[in-house]
Image (spheres, helix red, strand yellow):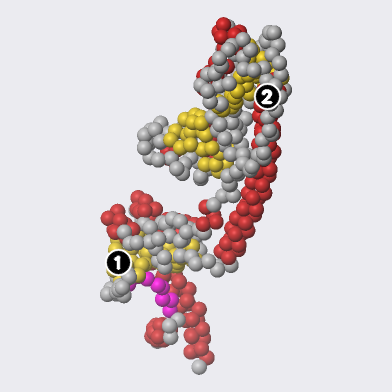
Amino acid sequence: MKYGLFGVLLFALMGCGVVYISPDVSKSDANVDVIPLTLSTVSKANASYYQAKTLPAVFFRNSGGAGALRGAGAIPEPALDKQSKPSTLPMRLPPDAPDLPYVIGVGDVILLATPTAASTVEQLSGLLAAQNSRQGYTVQDDGAIAIPDVGRINLAGLTLEDAEAQVFQSLVENQIDPSFSIEIAEFNSKRVTVGGAVVKPAVVPVTLVRLTLEQALAAAGGVTTRGQDYTSIRLYRDGTLYEIPLTEYLTRPKVQKTRLAAGDSIFVDTAFELDQAQAYFTEQISLAQFKQQARVQALNELNSEINIRRSVLEEERFNFQARLEADAVDRDYVYLTGEVKNPSRFAMPFGQTASLADALYSEGGLSNETANPSQVYVLRGQPGSEKIAAYNLNFQNAANLVLATKLELRPDDVIFVAEQPVTRWGRTIQQIIPSLITSGVFAATN
């Protein structure tokens, strides 16, 4: 009588839906294809097209910009008052410029070169994947070069050795393989001007190789004069005027090898027009001052422009992040359910794919107490079909965990982890016993 009553109550509870019913993947459903995960099936699953959502372009822009040299103003008119020739020309030799390492300046073009096509410095935007790839970068008015994906690197005032160390540090900080060589392709920051009685007035760059008076005059085509007695070479340096008679210059090789310094101005005078030579040097000084003032103004404008750009970028990025936090941004999601520690919605990353392992373990992984490691499924709808592909991953074999890192997720995938049989039975008992007690008491009182 007692067992008969128990059976009747159990049947009644089951009929009322009180007995626990656990979710599962039905292998008998015609619309569900259960596919064990292997390297082959993972490759087929990953073959489906997917274009990851990307971050807005504002996250890929920087606030750098190139400044431009403004107009330097009008050059003063030269003075042409002639003076009478003296009986002899004075001799005042300039000292040799100090033999110091070349210092990089504004306008120089720095060349970065990769030694082989396999160098990962190709990550620098603009460097081509070819042997001896080369890319030039101009030192701008603020003393920096701008390298995409790296940013601005200040090189002005540095020697080649120091510049190489600075670039190396910047590449390392940006996690780019610093396999490169550096050299100066164009020397534009340090120059010597040559004018007067020469074939062609010239601006001669100061390079890594020391520049001599002989080389500077040769670059201007040489001295053009019918008589040497009253021809002199005047050199202006740092506020001091030096004078070398042409006859002395031609007969003294040591004078010809006089080492020049950046900023020197040379004027070849054939008629002892001292005022004309002085006017030429004044022109050079005025022009340098005007250019310097223009550069200072351009640099201030550049800094202001960069600050404005930086503020705009920061505001746009902040607004995007605020929209992201408010869930107002179109995202792709994957859903985790079943015996996982944190059933939730997993947001797929911007600009790249996510794996099954990424989604599982970013949310805490499987429940060690209740999950059935052999019944981990990725449920995926098939486009244009009512069928559902259920990719089954058996975690009981620890080696299969590698497959979880290789299976790429797609939007709206559902990750389902079934429960262990003992868990299902335990939950059934937990629900049946209180109901049996309540039903038994009800039956006894009636």
- For disc 2, the marked residue is 276
In magenta, the rendered stretch is: 19-26
**Left or right relative to 253: residue 123:** left
Of the 4 image quadrants, the one containing the N terminus is: bottom left
Q: Position of residue 367 (x, y in %)?
A: 47, 61
Residue pushed farthest bottom? 446
**Left or right relative to 57: residue 79:** right
Q: Position of residue 225 (x, y in %)?
A: 56, 16
In this rendering, the answer to whether 131 lies above or below 232 is below
Q: Position of residue 389 (x, y in %)?
A: 32, 67
Name the residue rendered at 36%, 53% in the picture.
406
- For disc 1, the marked residue is 34
**Magenta region's main secondary structure?**
loop
Name the residue rendered at 58%, 6% in the picture.
252
Q: Position of residue 212 (x, y in %)?
A: 56, 17
Q: Nearer the viewer, residue 218 or 432?
A: 218
**Left or right relative to 152: residue 118:** left
Q: Nearer the viewer, residue 65 or 445?
A: 65
Instruction: Check if residue 40 falls in the magenta segment.
Output: no
C-alpha separation, residue under disc 1 versus residue under disc 2: 96 Å
Q: Helix, strand, or loop for circle 2?
A: helix
Q: Quadrant of residue 282?
A: top right
Q: Quadrant of residue 373?
A: bottom left
